[in-house]
Image (cartoon, rainbow, N blue to C red):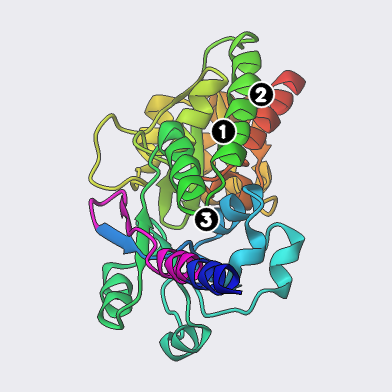
Amino acid sequence: MKNLIIGIIALSFVLISCTKEKKSLPTKIYFDDLGNRIELTKNPERIISAAPNLTEIIFALGAGDLLVGRTNFCNYPEETNKIPVVGDMFHLNLEKIVDLNPDLIFLTVEGNTKELYDKLKNLGLNVYVTNPKNLSGIKKSIRDIGEILNREKEADSIISDIEKRLNKINSERFQRQTAMFVVSFSPLIIAGKNTFIDEILSSVNLENIAPEKSFSAYPMISREEVINKNPDVILLPSINFSIEKILEVYPEWKEINAIKKGKIIYVDQDLFFRPGPRFIDAIEFLQKELSKH
């Protein structure tokens, strides 16, 4: 009996020790793309995504079940429809976010605002900001989010698949052509050199006519400059801009190579404007479209 009592006491000490160890998990420290320090005392179990590309990354990592909030722009994959909406990318419902009690909120520089970041931080919430400007940045975001959500293997698998598909495309280079990726016709805005869209274009040997240096990632360009640059291909985010409609607004463009040869490519905005795991799909889409011309 004495030995039994001693054994029970010893076991109790072991259990208490394990319980304390479980409660006092080591703090994990991360630095986001802006250098902000984030300290997490537990693995994130409730997260909010404030941008569509981040939502797509989270689902691609197999962590969609951790999402408790998303923006109304987050529409892919289909399962996002089941997740509560907390606002759009610029204006989030802070009261609703607090009620959802997230462990971590993901923001992006290009889609969200500094004011939104400050408001969330002032509420005592953990916020991680991403800033993928190119293909390397997209892969970094996948790796970083994968590490934070304990999906490192999934992140490695996604990146490995992207690189394999990208290498296949790079081995099938097209003849060099100049291109203009139109974001807006009024005013006339195009994708700049320092964007991931520019890298998508270069992946299929399209040279962006955008200025080498500009203040904005998506600079305005004059109609005269378009004539001077004379793009071989024009990419448009909407099928509403037919060649006829383009010439109604810019009749002088009738001599542009892209117009004369009918090299107009209509792209899916969600596919091309989201720096996430589907950017490789955008490259493959361009490859197929170029093969038709």
Identity of the residue drawn at 52% across and 30% down = 200
Crowding near the residue tagged with mark 2, few <14, some 14–19, many ≥20 C-alpha atoms within 10 Å: few
In this rendering, which labeled residue sits more in front, label 3 or label 1? 1
The first of marks 3 and 1 along the sequence is: 3
Disc 1 marks which amino acid? Asp
Report the mark closest to the observer, 1 or 2. Answer: 1
How packed mark 3 is, by other alpha carbons closer than 10 Å (few <14, some 14-19, many 20 or more), is: many
222, 212: nearer the viewer: 212
Q: Residue at x 61, y 29 (%)?
A: 162
Provide the residue span drawn in magenta: 13-36
Tag shown at residue 54: 3
Q: Give x and y (percent) for residue 18.
A: 47, 64
Q: Amino acid at mark 3?
A: Leu
Quadrant where the C terminus lies? top right
Tell me the amino acid under the disc marked 2: Lys
Q: Looking at the image, is 203 positioned above or below residue 171? A: below
In the rendering, at what x and y percent does residue 274 appear?
54, 49
Mark 3: secondary structure: helix
Task: Name the residue rendered at 68%, 54% in the picture.
Answer: 240
Q: Residues within 10 Å of mark 1 (few under 14, many from 20)?
A: some
Foreground of the two, 156 or 186: 156
